[in-house]
Amino acid sequence: MSTIDPAPHPLSARVRAELERMIIDGTLSPGERLNEVALAKQLGVSRGPVREAARLLERVGLVTVILNRGAFIRTVPLDEALDTYALNALLFGFGCAQLADSITADQALDLRGLYEGMEAAAAANAAEKFFTLNIAFHEHIMAFARNRQVEAVYLQQTRKLMLFRRRSFDRAATMAESNAGHRRILEALMAGAPEQARLYAEEHTRGGRARFLSAIEAPACGTAANLPK
């Protein structure tokens, strides 16, 4: 008998995508209980697809389902967040090195367009726009690198960071600093310099970790308050 999980019902997949959007944009907060009745009414569905969507989100680390209590937006301990940044530095570095050896003109134009969009967003102090383009820049690089296994792990880990990464882009100065890293990565990619691209990518991710730490108030117990688990 196959052990492969069946594909989710299209309606559950749609509800899952909407709930994921609400989690990432902060509509649903870390630690908050998913109110099946209210969400079903809001999304125009029955409770079943909401419950199934919660189970799907549990698999990717965004939701915790507790027996007899329901589903809650996950909170992430500080040490797990820092471990995830460390792993993502390696994965993103690998992806950039791979892409530097094979980047096409169309891919370079795509990434340059995203970079220029972030420049404009930073100048306008448009944090939400910057955050959206920033996600796209990283995800396009990993897709262009054409290693589906590495891309899948990277995206899974990045989902957890998205729960609180937007707090790292609350000021124009932090957006400008982040985009300077994007510029260095893009220049290395266009120059066909794999090792330089890897170093810049890892450095950029470490910079994101530093911006994250500066944006939170870490309590003495060593866990990050209000971070999704």
Image (cartoon, rainbow, N blue to C red):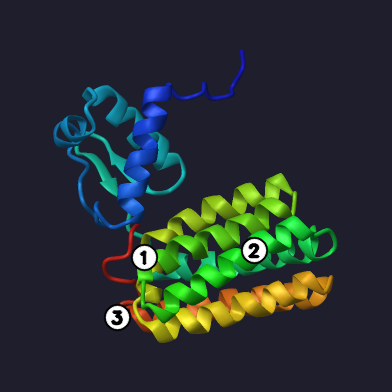
- Please say if 77 is above or below 143: below
Q: Quadrant of the C terminus?
A: bottom left
Task: Where is residue 23? Give x, y as percent.
Answer: 32, 51
Which residue is under mark 2? 111
- Please say if 226 is above or below 188: above
Q: Nearer the viewer, residue 40 or 134?
A: 134
Quarter of the image where one finds residue 17: top left
Task: Where is residue 169? Give x, y as percent.
Answer: 39, 75
SS type, badge 3: loop
Which residue is under mark 3? 217
Q: Nearer the viewer, residue 6 or 197?
A: 197
Q: Is residue 87 visible?
A: no
Amino acid tagged 1: Glu
Residue under the image location 58 percent in, 70 percent down: 115
Residues packed near mark 1 inside 10 Å, few (<14), some (14 to 19) or many (20 plus)? some
**Cα–Cα span, label 3 and label 1:** 22 Å
Q: Is label 2 in contact with label 3 (beta carbons under 8 Å)?
A: no
Residues packed near mark 2 inside 10 Å, few (<14), some (14 to 19) or many (20 plus)? many
**Cα–Cα span, label 2 and label 1:** 19 Å
**Cα–Cα span, label 2 and label 3:** 33 Å
Which residue is under mark 1? 128
Q: Nearer the viewer, residue 115 or 49?
A: 115
SS type, badge 2: helix
Task: Where is residue 218? Give x, y as percent.
Answer: 32, 79
Amino acid tagged 3: Glu
Between label 3 and label 1, give the one nearer the viewer: 1
